[in-house]
Amino acid sequence: MELAAATIGARGIRLAREAAALVRSGVDSPMESRLRLLLILNGLPEPRIGYVVNDSAGGWLATPDLSYPELRFAIEYDGQHHLVDARQWRQDIRRRENLEREGWLVRVITSYDLLHAPGTVVARISQDLHTRRYPHLAA
């Protein structure tokens, strides 16, 4: 163990600690983590993971991948299985409609968005936060 630490060096240890500080539990996929990191490393506020949304009657409605509950703003990452599994696709549509009915804004990010247009993803979410009047976001 000491040999490994000595081999890594001070810079490597610092980077490992910084990376470890960004780890969160409750994430369903590596791409959801990638999306969350894209947002926070580009200066956007950190979204909640696994926030349970209840409807106006108090019943479970959804658990968005990422969210800003105080703004009623959900961000969903949809991978390939959301398109090829018809049952999953129908459930996704119903869940989004239910969230929207309760006043939530739902944004869907795909692997293409994340891998080929990350700047657009950041711009979209930033604009949504601004539109939803996030109080600590620079104009």
Image (spheres, helix red, strand yellow):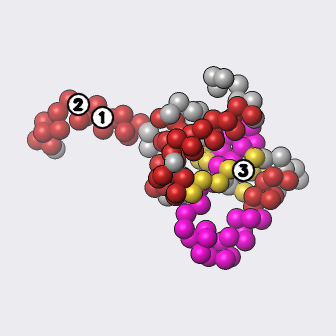
Which dot, 1 or 3, sits closer to the camera?
Answer: 3
Which of the image's four quarters has the N terminus?
A: top left
Residue linked to disc 3: 106
Label 3 sits on a secondary structure element that is strand
Residue 81 on the magenta segment: yes
Which of the image's four quarters has the C terminus?
A: top right
Magenta range is 67-94
Residue at the image point whose x is 51% and y is 45% from the top: 118
Query: What's under tag 1, amino acid-wise?
Result: Leu
Label 2 sits on a secondary structure element that is helix
Residue 41 on the magenta segment: no
Residue at the image point whose x is 52% and y is 58% from the top: 111
Q: Are marks 2 and 1 in contact (CB under 8 Å)?
A: yes
Query: What's under tag 3, amino acid-wise?
Result: Val
Which dot, 3 or 2, sits closer to the camera?
Answer: 3
Label 1 sits on a secondary structure element that is helix
Q: Quadrant of residue 11?
A: top left
Q: What x and y, as percent, mark residue 127?
A: 67, 36
The image shows residue 13, relative to residue 58, as above or below, that is above
Mark 1 surroundings: few (<14), some (14-19) or many (≥20) residues within 10 A: few
Q: What x and y, as percent, mark residue 12?
A: 23, 35
Residue linked to disc 2: 11
Q: What x and y, as percent, mark residue 5?
A: 17, 38
Q: Are marks 3 and 2 in contact (CB under 8 Å)?
A: no
Query: Between residues 7 and 123, which one lies in front from this camera angle?
Result: 123
Query: What's under tag 2, amino acid-wise?
Result: Arg
Q: Left or right: 97 with respect to 26?
A: right
Q: Left or right: 71 with respect to 136?
A: right
For residue 25, say whether it is visible: no
Q: What x and y, as percent, mark residue 108?
A: 65, 54
State which tag comes first along the sequence, 3 or 2: 2
The circle on residue 15 is 1
